[in-house]
Amino acid sequence: MSIFEALALLGTGVLAGIASTVASVASVVSYPVLLAIGLPPLAANVTNTMSLICTAAGSVAGARPELSGQRERALRLAVVTAIGGAAGAGALLIAPASTFAMVVPVLIAVAAALLLVQPLISGLAPRPGADRSRRRLAGLFAAAIYIGYFGAAGGVLLLAILATMFSESLIRLNALKNIISGAANAVAGAAFALFAPVDWAVVPLLAAGFLLGGMTGPRIARRLPARALRLLVGLCGLALAVKLGLAAYR
C-alpha cells in the first residue's frame, strides 16, 4: 500500500465517519473508495463494515450530552439491532450480494421521504407505548438485517423508525441511532472476521478515520438546527436512493 493510498483511506474514514454520524450515509463515501483501490465488491463490503464499528465508539465519545438518559433504551434496542445485524451478515455469507439490489433503492427512498414529512403527518407521530410497539421493533429488526447485509443509508431507515417511536429531538435520536446501528455492525463484523474475505491491511487506517469522524460528527450535528438536520439526512438518503436505483435498474 502506497503512502497516498494510506492517507486516502484515513481521510476517507474521517469523512465517512462524519457522514455516518451526521447524515447516516457513511458507505456512500467509503465503499466507492474501497472499490477504487482494487477491492472486490464483497471484500469492500465486509471490510467497510468491520471499520464502521469504530464509528459507534467515536460517536459515544462525541455525543455524551445527547446520549444522557438514553442508556436503558439504547441497550434494549441494541439487542434488537444486534440480532438483526447477525441475520443480515448470515444472509450475505450464503446469498448473492445482488439479492437486495432491486429493493434497496425503494427502501431508502421511502425511509428518507418519511423522515422529511414525519412532522407533518400525525399518524407518524410518536404515541404512548410506541417505543415498545411490535410493528416498530420489527421495523428496526428489518433495518438491522439490511445494515448487516450491506448497510448503505441503513441509518436513514433506523432514524425514520426511531422518529415514530420517541418524542425526542432529532439530535438525540440521531445519537441513539449511531449506537444501535453500531450494535448491528459489531455483530456483523464479528461474523465477517471469521468467515468473510476482510482486507485486514485496510481496516486499521479506515477504522482510525471512522473513529475520528465519529467523534467529530456529533459536534457538527449539534450545531445544525433540527429542521436542517432532518433536511440534510432526508435529502442525502433520497440522493443515494436515486444513485443506487440508477445502478440497479439500468
Image: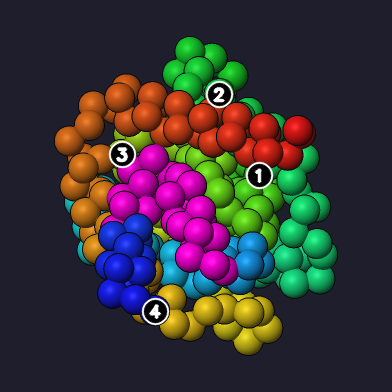
Q: CA distance from mark 1 to mark 4?
A: 41 Å
Residue 113 badge: 2
Residue 18 covered by magenta stretch = yes
* Depth check, front residue: 92 or 63: 92
Up-down relation of residue 164 to residue 176 (above or below):
above
On the rendered structure, is 87 left or right of 124? right
Q: Earlier in the sequence, mark 1 or mark 3?
A: 1
Q: Which residues are magenta?
A: 14-39
- Quarter of the rendering containing residue 24: top left
Q: Which of the two marks, 1 or 4, is nearer to us in this view?
A: 4
- At 63% from the left and 67% from the top, the residue drawn is 40
Q: CA distance from mark 2 to mark 1?
A: 16 Å
Which residue is label 1 attached to?
A: 139
Residue type at numbered disc 1 = Gly
Q: CA distance from mark 1 to mark 3?
A: 21 Å
Q: CA distance from mark 4 to mark 3?
A: 38 Å
Residue 1 badge: 4
Q: Secondary structure at mark 1?
A: helix
Which residue is label 3 attached to?
A: 171
Residue type at numbered disc 4 = Met
Please state the horizontal and vertical placement of residue 135, each as a whole percent of the image: 69, 41
